[in-house]
Amino acid sequence: MEVYFTRQFFRIKMSDIPKAYEPSAVEDKWYKTWLESGCFKARPDADPKNAYSIVIPPPNVTGVLTMGHVLNNTIQDILIRRARQMGKNAVWIPGTDHAGVATQSKVDAALRKEGTSARELGRDKFIERAKAWRDKHGGIIIEQLKKLGASCDWDRLVHTLDDSYSKAVLTAFVKLFKEGYIYRGKRMVNWCPVNLTALSDEEVIMKPQKSKLYKMRYELADKRGTFLEISTTRPETIMGDTAVAVNPNDPRYADLIGSFALRPFPQARIPIIGDEYVDMKFGTGVLKVTPAHDPADFEIGLRHNLPVIDVMNPDGTMNELAGPEFCGKDRFVARELAVKKLDEMGQLVSVEDYENNVGFSERGGVPIEPRLSDQWFMRYPKIAEAKQAVESGAIKFWPQRWEKTYVHWLDNIRDWCISRQIWWGHRIPVWYRKGVANPDINNPEEVYVGVDAPSDPENWIQDEDSLDTWASSWLWPFATQGWPDKAEMDRLQMSAFYPTSDLVTGPDIIFFWVARMIMAGLEFLPGDMADRIPFKNVYFTGIIRDMQGRKMSKSLGNSPDPLEIIAKYGADGLRFGVMNCAPQGQDILFDESRVELGRNFCNKLWNACRFRQMNGGLGDNSSAEKIIGRIDSSKLDPDDHAILSSLSKCAAKVDSDYASYQFNSITQGVYSFFWNDFCGWYLEVSKARLSDASQKETVLAVQDLCIRQILLLLHPFTPFITEELWHLMGYGRDGEFIQNVNPSFVETLKGCGLSVDESAAAQINALKDFAVKARSLKAQCGKANSKDSKFSLVPANPAARALFETSSDKLKKLVGAECLETVDAPLDAPVALSELGAVYLDITKTDSGAEIARLEKEREKLSAAIESAKSRLSNADFVSKAPQKVIDGAKRQLDDCQAKLDEVLKLLRTFGK
RNA sequence: GGGCGAUUAGCUCAGUUGGUUAGAGCGUCUGCUUUACACGCAGGAUGUCGCAGGUUCGAGUCCUGCAUCGCCCACCA
């Protein structure tokens, strides 16, 4: 393959490659190559039992990438890439959503600018315009996802308004209608006066508002001069009052029930009724009843057969029923006017500041208006089973706590208003026979319901409404896989890929989408519950916020553009940085410094490979077996064993972290291993060993093995740089992609018969401790940068002496010493205590004060540890009840610290302390 | 009104079945062009783990109560 460097090319070029990793060319090159090589496609002939699938939460087709998308899609990409590495037949199904109300209102706005309107254009022309809008602004987000590295099978891209998807939506509607789950009725709905459509309860956002509570008085019709005091927050609906209600158990008013009050304007006699809904303790205990403008009042109206007087137009202005003074005025203007009028009439008692919750339209941004209108509703199917699916663990939530929210919603579920008075969406597949005044929905002569239009369309008129966008996206996991078309389902291997494996989404759409998808899957697919559920795991991400904890939003301008970040730091850096700071299900306060961490990490990785290359030509790196074959086990020293042991642990931790979806733990574990253990220690100690010809090949092979493994572990997180280095380092046999290589490490070692001495880590820790103490000593003596220091060690024991002596070359380089020696007696020189023994820096003492302070600090720490261990060990309960492991640990702590303390005290005595 | 989450270093956060002397990144201070990396290296400083009780041999971790912040649900006008 020509697209990437061959190994030969690499040999020539590697030393010329830049010191700093430059992501952009690498990323574009590999994305293109992956696409051309079909890396993101499922394998048609693979075992269905080995399948792994994800459906993308479809972004708004005209949207742009946000940090939320970055988090969400990076997680999905990690999962799908990991699945490929594990040899699964993996597919990530992408798609976009038509976003009904959101898109329609944008197109409306564009039309207004041109001085026209949707109404003026008519339905067909409007839809043409909306399609043009979608095609112009659509698809940007798909290109952006590609920049991020998302490895979706783009040939399977689905849009909710595609013909095949639309067919699925209509099929589902017709089926539910026939089963009686869908009905039409005149109900109180949430009405958005801006978008002129009904909304579902979920699209209403409750916001606390500083409003006013108006206390006013209504005169008794048959007892003029006597008044009832009533409180309201909405005096503009007085004109729609058709009763006054009191609680029948309220002694203050019970005798008034059955009499009449006078509505102030337009003046009218309205009955005083008794209804237990009225809270005696609230306000005066008297409620004005406006059935057309309040859901609770509507219910009261039904109970008492009250007339319904709607005094508003759909756009929130008052209509003629409100009277000539109010007609045409906006509801909020009308409110002020009504108050003024009440005051003039002497019927306003008081105005108080009042905080209450007001429902706002999610898209329109204005208070919704409860409005009585003809709408389509859905009684949800499979509610009980949907609950059971999650409670039984057939579907698992990560983190689990969202189960409670989910179950609570299902327990209190109410019918779903699925009709929208907009044109951009799936038009309701219901036709009414022309000329029938009040068509009976259950009479096929009068109402036709079907996926296809009636065969004699000239005799029918189709319902004007469209479906709620969520009433199409709730079918996503199977409507993207060809359902209900059998041939398409086969072509797309739905039997292998449904149920999907993992769903990754935000908890903000748990009701909108997740719960509904579960019900849809259970309702529309055949088989046992396990076959019908849409996914087996749901991972709920946190929400990305800014450093002040505010949600990212366009209006606040606090949402960074992921594309700019990618341009600056690389997609891998962004991915790594975001994943590193995203613990499971917790909100994230995002800052660019997170990405800097990721960028720096990639750069470190790059340079570790450069360093490896500079130290000698690559041997056969084409497989782990080949690399291990280059190792001469007799040349392995404790450092080799320690790094391989540490890498094994790191790899095992990665495995278990995947199993519990702990992505931040993976990045942290790999970061720490790679940066500290591998670069910080192993590569440094390698430097001395590389000049020893007898060790060099083994050391380089161990390096190659480690780097190979790190690349494999990192690949799902940072796909671009790992693919680049995979090939540059010659790991890809015959150009094989890293995504197809199994990342298990422990098995690899076992399979190759390389046994790792797990005890070596302790020796290495002692050497590290020596290095830290020696450097610290130098720094404190102002010799941090001298390369010709001389250190003398009084070894703590013979093993320490042996280790120190065999490691002398490495240590010299590490601590910047010209000479390291062991001595038997303390010197009169600056000293520190290391695990290997007392270490002396061979210079004339200049500042014993600092040294005494350091030793005294050490003494305090050790004494505290000793006290703690002693008190535990002298506690009979501890000794009898604690597990042996813990008791042994305490004993060891005591012995170790005691020995060190003895040394420290001895040293302090040489200072006369 | 109900439910959920958070509270650990100056900042942002890890710390998953309770177990040695509580960690990371960033920031900060000191010093470094050390034959990979200044997107780096070495060294240093910084914590009554929100508060109060309780369980336990042992609590950042479990229980109870409280406080503060945030989110979700809920038709008191």
Image (cartoon, helix red, strand yellow):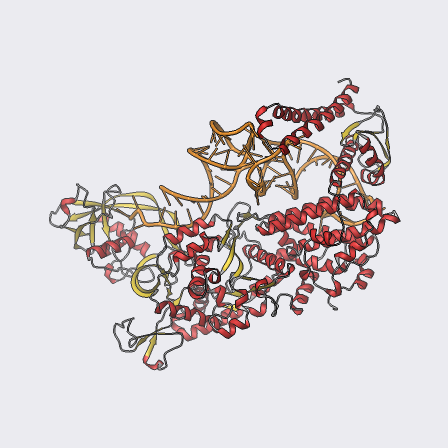
Where residue A493 sits, quadrant-wise, is: bottom right
Q: In the drawing, does residue A793 fall left or right of residue A496? A: right
Q: Residue at x 77, y 17 (%)?
A: A912
Where is residue A251, by image quadrant?
Answer: top left
Q: Position of residue A445 (x, y in %)?
A: 29, 77
Question: Which residue reaches farthest top?
Answer: A912
Residue A379 placement (x, y as % from top left) = 35, 61
Residue A260 falls left or right of residue A141: left
Tally of marks:
0
Q: Give the image quarter of residue A354.
A: top left
Percent across and percent down for residue A410 are: 39, 54
Q: Is A842 rendered above or below residue A569?
A: above
Say whether residue A607 is visible: no
Which of A237 and A824 lies nearest the eye of the viewer?
Answer: A824
| Camera-nearest residue between A510 and A189 | A510
Q: Extreme left residue here?
A: A222
A508 or A752, nearer to the observer = A752
Comparing A230 with A873, the one in front is A873
Residue at left 50%, top 50%? A551
Decide if residue A897 is on the left or right side of residue A847.
left
Residue A684: x and y in percent read 79, 44
Looking at the image, can residue A211 be seen? Answer: yes
The quarter in which the C terminus of chain A is drawn is top right
The image quadrant where one finds the N terminus of chain A is: bottom right
Q: Is residue A811 above or below residue A838?
A: below
